[in-house]
Image (spheres, rainbow, N blue to C red):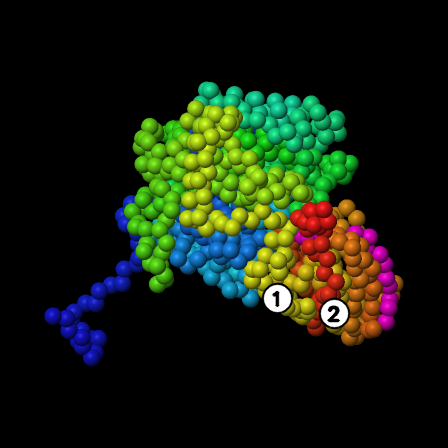
Amino acid sequence: MSFTAQDVREQTTAYAKAQPLRPPGGAPNVLIILVDDVGFGASSAFGGPCRMPAAERLAGHGLKYSRFHTTALCSPTRQALLTGRNHHSVGMGVITEMATTAPGYTGMRPNSAATMAHILKYNGYGTAAFGKMHQTPAWETSPSGPFDRWPVGDGFEKFYGFLGGETNQWEPTLIDGTMPVLPPRRPEEGYHLSEDLVDQTVAWVRSQRALTPDKPFLAYLSFGATHAPHHVAPEWREPYRGQFDHGWDAQRERTLARQKELGVVPPEAELAPWPEEVPHWDQLTDAQRLVGAALMENYAAFATHTDHQVGRLVDQLQEMGVLDDTIIFYMLGDNGASAEGGLDGTTNELFTLNGMTDTIENVMAGLDELGGTKSYPHYPVGWALAMDTPYQWTKQVASHYGGTRNGLIVHWPTGIQDKGGIRHQWHHVIDVLPTVLEITGLPEPYSVDGVAQRPIEGTSMRYSFDDAGAEDRHTTQYFEMFGNRGIYHLGWTAVTRHRIPWETGAQQMRPFDEDVWELYDTNTDWSQAHDLAQQHPDKLARLKQQFLIEAAKYQVFPLDDRLVERANADIAGRPDLLTGRTSMTLYAGMKQLQENTVPNVKNKSHSITAEIEVPEGGAHGVIVVQGGRFGGWSLYLNQGRPTYCYNYFGRQSFYVRAPEVLAPGHHTVRLEFEYDGGGVGKGGSGLLTVDGAKVADGRIEATIPYLFSADETLDIGADSASPVSDDYSSTDSAFTGTIHYVRIDIGDDDHSDLESPEHRHHRMMTRQ
């Protein structure tokens, strides 16, 4: 019988020592490495032209999966990866910035779908995420939170990275936990985000091993690379000079031949048909071929540089003695290769993100800066198709394997005996979580944080580790993205492409029941090269019916092909931090405010009012800025003179400059912008006043219609990333006076949706 004394000196029965929570004995560390926008045919590990020796090394001592699939887009794939559920099941039918009120598209992971990080943390794992985490609802990304759907609320005890879909690799906007931070170095000092992410990952693992060596870890390293912008130092491009002059058609042939040699496709595999919308290499002008080859050289260098960072991480794990006890999932892409650069490519991807088309002349003018801090490049559609060899289509096209089939490498020295093996079992990204649970010996939870859990919808891949000939266990899977949809069942696929990623206009808005379905037997036609819809109409009809069943089950309906309209929170109906507000007052030190969390000044009249104090000796620096080098605006003092700069895609800057230096003392600096109207992206007039008196005015001939930046933010008192104006650099942008407040007021002449392709088509059809 236990005995509790009043005095500890009289206590004779020892109390039980508290034991730290740990998973079952032998549970390995888990490392998930995700590289963005890598097509199946890009990496050398899967027969592509981008040399990725770390991928080859891990594959040589592990397994390659030749039929592994994603959702065709970033946020949905990532949510499916972490939850083990289909993307619509967890509200991520599209990226968070296009969320709606429909259950499959809310952009909000339900608490009934705990993440891998939740489950492993609650079972004794250390958990950390580094890099791109594009799952937080856009309206919750401000410093006001809430933070329960940030990475630190998704079960990760440590987070270092960014919340958006992409970021500048040289000058990223970074978050540590929930706090905005600056990169540790400037690009001129050798900084690159991919290198930083690996440094952070290594430092975290080291601390875990030093302090709790008996505690396994989950590390999720999600690179911003190789998503645009394709940023890489010129020395990485040198080995690729001239390596793509043969063009994308010839590259597809070379890649397919190499894929057959490697065994990642069967000997009878054929190249899938080439889209008639995309020119062949020999149909291009000399200038188009020059630009296309240069952009592809730059991308290949970017991919090699990224893989080199993976190699550094693997080397460090080996040096720490934990590599053998770590299962690594190296995912070469969260979707197919990206066609978002347009038919000719671009040196400023924000052009295409705003529904515009770059010109060959503009791209050629920027080739000397390609990959550097003054470029924001993306390769042409033709190279995206080639990087998806041997399959059809690209990222966003969930109907075809070009959009959804990605290379997967699994490396686990203590758990995989068939070193260098290839696995042809059909699997999907939702299968990673149940695989992790099986190998760690952890059960699927029925309740997490008091919330009953939805069943995990994936199938463990563990059965295939030891048996290359094992029968498939994941036998049915639907796909849908932007109305592009498909169904896989026992080797057969029924698919329909509804819209093309790089085109806008009426063709995207045809009724869904007018879409043409194709039928493929991938038991005999590996690459979906031969459409059998005419030969087997009954089979097609059954599969179309099966799609309806699966889509209803997993919250796919209603289908939604809207693009620009869904980017408008008022039209999409999702929560909005700014609902009903036409004014916001901000204060000194507020920084890295995402575009979705501040007043939208695009396509409307507005004013920016700043109350400042100029010290003796004068002041300089940024008062308020939004965006960066590739698009945005800034109100600042340039050598003491109030100045407004509107940066139009980094191609042209419009200035309104005061002639006089501000005297010491209190001042009200105000910029009034009067929008011309008549649609989106039009011009306007800028009026600059100081203490109520006009000091300057000027024309802004054109404005950015939809998006200043995918990552750069609004800041008060400094330009935290790349500079909007050439009048200052980010290192000398801090305001040297005092900012009492900055107020942004927007007018009621909103033209943000008047001339979207969807609206224009609707208007034309109505007139008919």
Residue 518: x %, y % from top left: 51, 32
Please give the name of the residue rendered at 74% of the width and 48% of the height, measured from the top-left corner.
650
Residue furthest left as drawn: 1
Neighbourhood count class around disc 2 (C-alpha, 10 Å): few under 14, some 14–19, many 20 upward: many
For this orientation, the residue located farthest to the front is 768
* Residue labelled with disc 2: 610
On screen, residue 599 versus residue 638, left or right, reads left
Residue 397 in percent (x, y) is at 55, 39
Amino acid type indicated by mark 1: Thr
Q: Is residue 618 visible?
A: yes
Task: Tell me if 19 is positioned left or right of 211 in this view.
Answer: left
The residue at 64%/34% (across/down) is 381
The region drawn magenta spans 693-709
Q: Position of residue 8 (x, y in %)?
A: 21, 75
Q: Can residue 320 be seen at all in this image of the molecule?
A: no
Residue 420 painted magenta: no
Q: Which amino acid does label 2 sit on?
A: Ala
Q: Nearer the viewer, residue 457 or 411?
A: 457
- Residue 329 sits above or below residue 100 on the image: above
Return the residue at label 1.
579
> Which one is nearer the viewer's eye here, 128 or 544?
544
